[in-house]
Amino acid sequence: MSLFDSEFLKRLEYLSLISKRVFRGQLLAQRRTKQMGGGIEFADHREYSRGDDLRYLDWNIYARYGDLLLKRFQEEEDLHVYILLDISPSMNTGAPSKFDYARQVAAALAYIALADLDRVAIHAYAHEVCASMQLTRGKDRILSVLRFLDELKVTGTNTDLARVVRGFVNRAPRTGLVIILSDLFDQSGFKKGMDILRHRKFEPHVIQLHTQEEAQPSFLGDIELVEVETGELRKLTVTERKLRQYQQLFREFLEQIETYCRNYSLSCTRTTIDVPFDELILRMMRAAGGLA
């Protein structure tokens, strides 16, 4: 697995060691559920109802006040982490490609979650889900994760996040954190898919990737462009004025993503692929408040 060599594995282990369960904070959204008895932390009481288990009665309160109240406890749940990885043709640009970079970031996030005993699933998508690794748990599963990621290929036509998400939420066994690794170059827009996740009580985290060339292209003159996802061919003359217009539109596109996430209190990470993947993860940790 050339993408995941021994040096890559060493960097993964380093990230795991310094994470100190930081992703149980804002990024991996610690889950706690209230249930009767057997928990690890007292939460509150509720009134006794006919048929309730008498073992969980608070006898001290009954002896003092005569009230029949049952103890409730909080217990941590395993977190379900779903990684939606864009493998559409637009991800196959850059050097290294956005596709390769996204797979490395996905591997790092999966490794940290698995080391923290969370459950991880990966769904690779373009116009639909093209390949899936179902929920798995345990640090020893990382080699299976790496093999799955290593065998993925860029495929599909145009990206359709909304269609992908509709299918995903109907098949997911329960809600959890959804990490979207993509350039978000979606002709129908990214908001519909994000809205579905929010409304179905998932917690989206967006990691938007792009290259420096996509943000600030430098070519001028007569060129021929091919839309990589649709195959559409277009000839045009690029002037300095048009180049500035494009750069402004691209900035507005990135601002739309950040504004949407900010308005709905969603986590959002934006990066160019020249940032080493482990530096990106460390930056995410700092943003989650886990590192100085």
Image (spheres, helix red, strand yellow):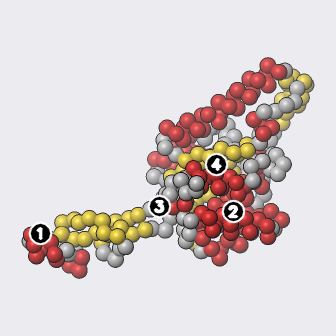
How dense is the environment of label 1, judged by Cα within 10 Å: few (below 14), some, or many (20 and up)? Answer: some
Q: In the image, what residue occupies the spot 26% across and 65% down?
A: 44
Q: Toward the viewer: 283 or 190? A: 283
Residue 207, disc: 4
Which of the 4 quarters of the picture holds residue 285? bottom right
Residue 216 against residue 264 in the figure, above or below: above
Q: Is residue 79 left or right of residue 35?
A: right
Distance Cα–Cα, label 3 vs label 1? 33 Å
Q: Amino acid at mark 1?
A: Asp
The extreme front residue here reads 292
In this figure, which residue is indicated by the disc labeled 1?
Answer: 67
Distance Cα–Cα, label 2 vs label 4? 14 Å
- Total numbered circles: 4
Task: Say which label, 4 or 3, has the lower sequence index.
Answer: 3
In this figure, which residue is indicated by the disc labeled 2?
Answer: 107
Image quadrant where one finds the C terminus: bottom right
